[in-house]
Image (cartoon, rainbow, N blue to C red):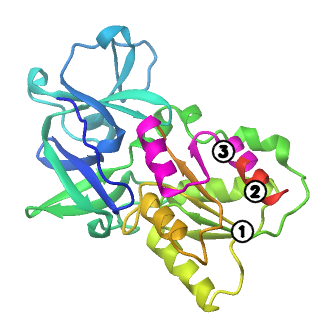
Amino acid sequence: METNILMESGTNELEVLEFTIGSNHYGINVAKIKEIVPYNKVTPVPNAHPCVEGIFMPRDLMITVVDLAKVIKAQPSNNVTSDMFIITNFNQLNVAFHVHSVVGIHRVSWADIITPDATISTADNGIATGIVKIDNQLIIILDFERIVSEISPETGLKVSDIDALEGRSKVDSHILIAEDSALLMALITDSLKKSGYTNVTSCVNGQIAWDYLEGVKKGENPDDIACVITDIEMPLMDGHRLTKLIKSDNDLKDIPVIIFSSLINEQMRLKGESLGADAQLSKPEIGQLVTEIDKFLRK
């Protein structure tokens, strides 16, 4: 099964692939998926992380297989021959996730996705980024970036790139960030402050960021915004919708918008360009993010 669904940009919608592990239903953004294939026999890798099942090589491309049942501490499959691999590409990585069945694809609005509260997911613990109800079935959208970064920490933000930037002169330009992951928000904010950007406002999704910008226009929020950094995947309003709203507003369209997401590939880059994004970067490259901000704010 291949995924090749093209959606209009900036509509605040996404395609969610529903799959199961045991009797529970989970979801993944279709934009992360390269293809879906039947279970393949894997080759175990010595000393690998316990959640890494092994590797396999479709079309001479070596891909790591992560057993999601182990990640979420569920019972293993009763019959792996009927299981599926969801092969993904994000953060410049190809990873296959072993699931028990694939149910189907649903088009939903980000506005319908509920952010988990602290009893389910926190900055330090939890891999659920959202919950959506479809046909009376609760589907938990998993944080695949966090799953992979916990298995292999070097695949996350390259915060070591920031070490050389410490001690630079401070710039008071006001930066607005829209990012739903509390862990990533903390890392990005800390990296910006080390790089001299201390005037940062954090928003947990695009809707809150847009509300803040409208408050600036009305004079309710006094500081002008010099730059907006936004993720793509966020509950209530995604980064593409936020970018479209900013670039369609006569009072805000000149604000530089940087999309900083794990989903930057050729197709998503074209979408971001069509919406007017000033720069687009893949999430591991925190050093490049600071370089792009420098271009706009340290002229």
Q: Is residue 67 left or right of residue 169?
A: left
Q: Position of residue 269 (x, y in %)?
A: 48, 43
User: What range of the chain is rendered magenta?
Assistant: 266-291
Using the image, tell me which numbered label, if any, was put on residue 157: none
First in sequence, mark 3 or 1: give its number.
1
From the image, tell me which residue sits under label 1.
226
How far separated are the C-alphas under marks 1 and 2?
8 Å
Q: In this rendering, is residue 172 above or below 63?
A: below
| x 50%, y 36%: residue | 91
Say if mark 1 contacts mark 2, CB within 8 Å.
Answer: yes
Between disc 2 and disc 3, the foreground one is 2
Amino acid at pointer 1: Ala
- Quarter holding the C terminus is bottom right
Amino acid at pointer 3: Ile
- Disc 1 crowd, CA 10 A, few/some/many (<14, 14-19, 20+): some
From the image, tell me which residue sits under label 2.
296
Q: Does the magenta stretch include residue 289?
A: yes
From the image, tell me which residue sits under label 3.
286
Dominant SS of magenta comes to helix
